[in-house]
Amino acid sequence: MNRRELRQQLVAARKGIAPGAAHRAGLQASQQAWKLQILQRATRIAAYFPMGGELDCRALIEQAWARGRDVYLPILHGNRLRFRPYTAATRVAPNRFRIPEPVSGAELPATAMDVAITPLVGFDSAGNRLGMGGGFYDRSFHFLLQRTRWRHPRLVGLAYDLQRLTKIDRQPWDVPLDAVVTESANYIFAV
Ligand SMILES: Nc1ncnc2c1ncn2[C@@H]1O[C@H](COP(=O)(O)OP(=O)(O)OP(=O)(O)O)[C@@H](O)[C@H]1O
Ligand SMILES: [Mg+2]
């Protein structure tokens, strides 16, 4: 199966999860996530606005607020992502992909985040990530590919367990994940 077919199949599976189960999975994933040291240590946490059956990260965002962390959401800046603060009072408006973005607030670059929680379509046991195919996360975090010893920010995928694949062929531009959190487990790829 090529990347396009794989994406179609996995997005359909993700969208097929019933609302109640999806809600529970979001709560369970949030609980799992706070067991990760990289999240426990993070002050600036980039999350995402769940769309298209992506695992609901709202519980994780609320937990981050409750723990006094600064939460950010991505905004499109050309073909890269930048990040704006997100609080309960933040107004959002849809971008060109109809994904809600904060309408105001200081724009920070990817390098300013401690952890970026990314949605994904598929992941494998080596931390390879299959996204929606726009290359936005890969472009925005490309600088991590040059760093061998000190990885910052850390990338944490959030996904359903059913999005786990045996092997994803990694392309030269693909930026791997440090960990993936699902509703039932944490997969840690880099310490
Ligand atoms: N660092 C980069 N510089 C230039 N182009 C890039 C870079 N990273 C990715 N791209 C482009 O983005 C396209 C899509 O990449 P890919 O198929 O890996 O998307 P993805 O990882 O699924 O998407 P996303 O990162 O948005 O979740 C690639 O065909 C490539 O041309
Ligand atoms: Mg990629």
Image: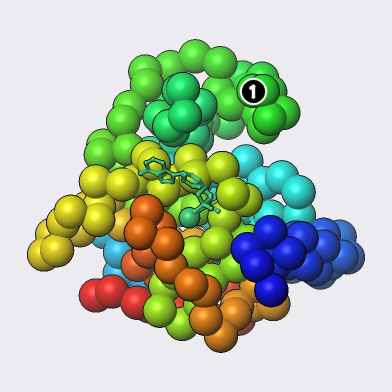
* Residue, disc 1: 95
Pointer 1: residues within 10 angstroms few (<14), some, or many (20+)?
Answer: few
The residue lying toward the viewer, choosing from 21 and 107, is 107
From the viewer's perspective, is residue 54 above or below residue 139? below
The residue lying toward the viewer, choosing from 83 and 105, is 83
From the viewer's perspective, is residue 31 above or below residue 101? below
Asked whether mark 1 and ligand 1 are closer than 8 Å, the reply comes as no
Residue 103 is situated, as x and y percent measured from the top left of the image, at 56, 16
Q: Quadrant of the N terminus?
A: bottom right
Residue that extends furthest to the front in the rendered view of this protein: 2
Residue that extends furthest to the top in the rendered view of this protein: 104
* Residue 85 can be seen in this image: no
Residue 51 is situated, as x and y percent measured from the top left of the image, at 71, 45
Q: How many marks?
A: 1
Residue 2 is situated, as x and y percent measured from the top left of the image, at 65, 67
Residue 151 is situated, as x and y percent measured from the top left of the image, at 20, 58
Query: Relative to residue 97, is residue 115 drawn left or right?
Result: left
Q: Residue at 43% across / 17% down in the picture?
A: 105
Report helix, strand or loop for mark 1: loop
Query: Relative to residue 120, is residue 26 drawn left or right?
Result: right
Q: Amino acid at mark 1?
A: Asn
Query: Relative to residue 100, is residue 135 drawn left or right?
Result: left
Q: Quadrant of the C terminus?
A: bottom left
* Residue 6 can be seen in this image: yes
From the viewer's perspective, is residue 107 above or below residue 60? above
